[in-house]
Amino acid sequence: MNHLLKMLLCVAVLGNFAVVQSCKKEDKPMPVANTEIDASTLAKIKSQGFSTKDAQKVAGGYVVEGDIFLSEEILNQRIASPVMKVAHAEQYRTANVITGLPRTITISVSGLPQIYSTATDAAIARYNALGLQLSFSRVASGGQVEIRHSSLGAGVLYRSAGFPDSNGNPASPILLNADANALGSNPNHDYLATVIAHEIGHTIGFRHTDYYNISISCGIGGNEGPTTAGVVQIDGSPATAEANSWMLACIGAGVNRTFNGNDASALDYLYGSRVLNPLPDGLYKLVNKNSGKVLDVSGISLDNGAKVWQYGWLNGNNQKWYLTYLGSGYYRVMALHSGKVLDVTSASQEPTALIHQWEWLNGLSQQWRLLRNADGTYALVNRNSGKVVDVSDLSMNDTAPVWQYGWWGGANQRWYIEKL
């Protein structure tokens, strides 16, 4: 892969200790043949999630995937982490993740030209637009993640900070080389924002998307085959790899990569819907993605058993719902006008059982899990049945009944939950 380094910017990840990026156009360490690496070391490299194809022994450690230096120390660290599988050849692997959610991480930029600050703001905006439980804010100095200038040498563009520590805090600092022989003082803005977003991704626990098949982004490199230990399939991921993930190992100069759908799903998996209480207690309206109509108690009824349907927004109190977190990942959803709650008729577990309002009895059929989708909508999952709130027959009409149904990802099962 070394012959590609003059054309490709190879993005490297660090472990919590001493993985050093060596994306250089020159002055690379001289390798020895792969055959001089013993089988136990190759096994350690593979267990860390890196490809062993063309692994090279250098002074003090090993170079893998063409640009990532692994010290002996990092190879002896045990990684006990989930692997989140996106498509067949796209995977994320995390050792530690950020804890204490919801949480805002501060980022500061120092010793770098102004464009680096504006590109950092753009990278932050990309994350914050996803509405995760993890957000970012730039501060003048002393950020929890510091982005600093460092003269890393000719052709060495940046160095990753690493992964979150065992206390759930982000890694720092990220080092960027703004010297004329590296990124320079005025690189392309969107490209620089992509680089910074990628490095932030490492600080919050993401490894290269194509860590076991870097040919996806680098053009060459073998497929080690998917690991089976700790794999979690993300629902809805495609059957083939995509070539535009923000965490791919290599990126061409000037390329802009925003989050693709799988990236958003993976971020959401760690820091979105799988958070037990994704929304604070408060008053909301629930807007169906398919129809644009809202969840509404029929006839503004105050009675037990009044059916719930969809209707155009009228700003009525029967269209406003107070969400209260109950613990264990579930909410009570109460109609403002009646004080009664969203409930499945007769505590049914059957598909097409109608949704109605009923006085609060603390029943399982009255408790709802809010699972955030990558598109910003939510699925409302009933604790009793495991089925979701669904507009019957994909209707676009006012007064269409709302029932429960098994999740299949339809737009009529997705709800925007908007704060009032």
Image (cartoon, rainbow, N blue to C red):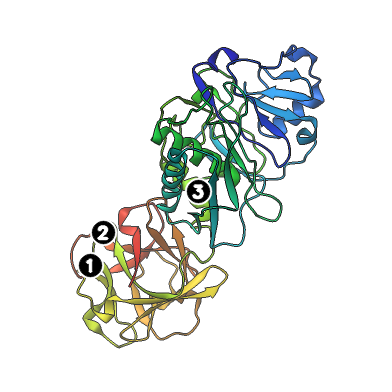
Mark 3 or mark 2, whichever is nearer to me: 3
User: Is the C-beta separation of discs 2 and 1 under 8 Å?
Assistant: yes
Residue 392 vertical placement versus 344 (above, below) = above
Mark 3 or 1, nearer chain start? 3
Q: Position of residue 112 (x, y in %)?
A: 51, 38
Q: Which mark is residue 393?
A: 2
The three-letter code of the residue at mark 2 reads: Asp
**In which quadrant will I find the C terminus?**
bottom left
**Which residue lies under the disc numbered 1?**
400
Specify whether residue 245 is in view. Answer: no
Between marks 3 and 2, how big is the CA–CA gap?
A: 32 Å
Mark 3 or 2, nearer chain start? 3
Residue 84 vertical placement versus 282 (above, below) = above
Q: Determine whether the residue tagged by mark 1 lies in a helix, strand or loop.
A: loop
Q: Position of residue 417 (x, y in %)?
A: 36, 65
Q: Residues within 10 Å of mark 2 (few under 14, many from 20)?
A: few
Between marks 2 and 1, how big is the CA–CA gap?
A: 9 Å
Identify the residue at horizontal 64%, vertical 34% (top origin): 227
Q: Quadrant of residue 300?
A: bottom left
Mark 2 or 1, nearer chain start? 2
The three-letter code of the residue at mark 3 reads: Leu
**Which residue lies under the disc numbered 3?**
267
Q: Position of residue 174 (x, y in %)?
A: 59, 40
Residue 167 vertical placement versus 266 (above, below) = below
Between marks 3 and 1, how big is the CA–CA gap?
A: 34 Å
The three-letter code of the residue at mark 1 reads: Ala
Identify the residue at horizontal 59%, vertical 25% (top origin): 156
